[in-house]
Amino acid sequence: MHVTSDHIHVLIEAGDEAGALQVIPEAIESMRSVLLKRNASFKFQEGVHVTLLPPWHIQVLASFVRDQDRYHSMNTVEDELDQIFRPGIAATPNIN
């Protein structure tokens, strides 16, 4: 998990797609509940972006999540959404 002032990345590893689809709504509600209890101003502006990946991509995504501070020193949240999470956009992230 990586938390910034304007977005959160959470990596959840599940045994299969059905397991992931079951745990994602529960995880979202748990995060929302914790943030609200801490009086955090929290609202999903564009919803939740979910990416289901095969197991061999876990380490790549884990590295991306760990590297968020460096990534966002060069890219905005909008850049990240356009480059990585919005469907139909084919781009390469600027990870140097």
Image (spheres, rainbow, N blue to C red):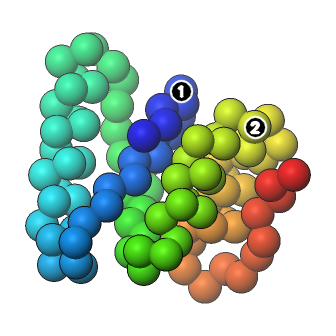
Q: Secondary structure at mark 1?
A: loop
Q: Is residue 22 left or right of residue 17?
A: left
Percent position of residue 33, x then y = 16, 31
Q: How many marks?
A: 2
Percent position of residue 53, x then y = 43, 76
Give the residue drawn at x 24%, y 37%.
Answer: 31
Where 50 falls versus 69 (above or below)? below
Asked if the residue under mark 1 is in contact with the one under mark 2, i.e. CB atoms within 8 Å, the reply is no
- Please tell me which residue lies in front, 74 or 61: 61
Percent position of residue 54, x then y = 42, 80
Percent position of residue 55, x then y = 41, 74
Give the residue drawn at x 27%, y 25%.
Answer: 35
Amino acid tagged 2: Arg
Where the N terminus falls, by quadrant? top left
Give the residue drawn at x 21%, y 26%.
Answer: 34
Where 10 falls versus 15 (above or below)? above
- Please tell me which residue lies in front, 16 or 77: 16
Mark 2 or 1: the one toward you: 2
On the image, which quarter does residue 80 sit in?
bottom right
Q: Which residue in the rendered view is the most extreme toward the right?
A: 96
Per the image, the residue denoted by label 1 is: 5
Q: Is residue 22 left or right of residue 56?
A: left
Amino acid tagged 1: Ser
Q: Is residue 75 left or right of residue 16?
A: right
Give the mark, 2 or 1, whose residue is nearer the N terminus.
1
Per the image, the residue denoted by label 2 is: 70
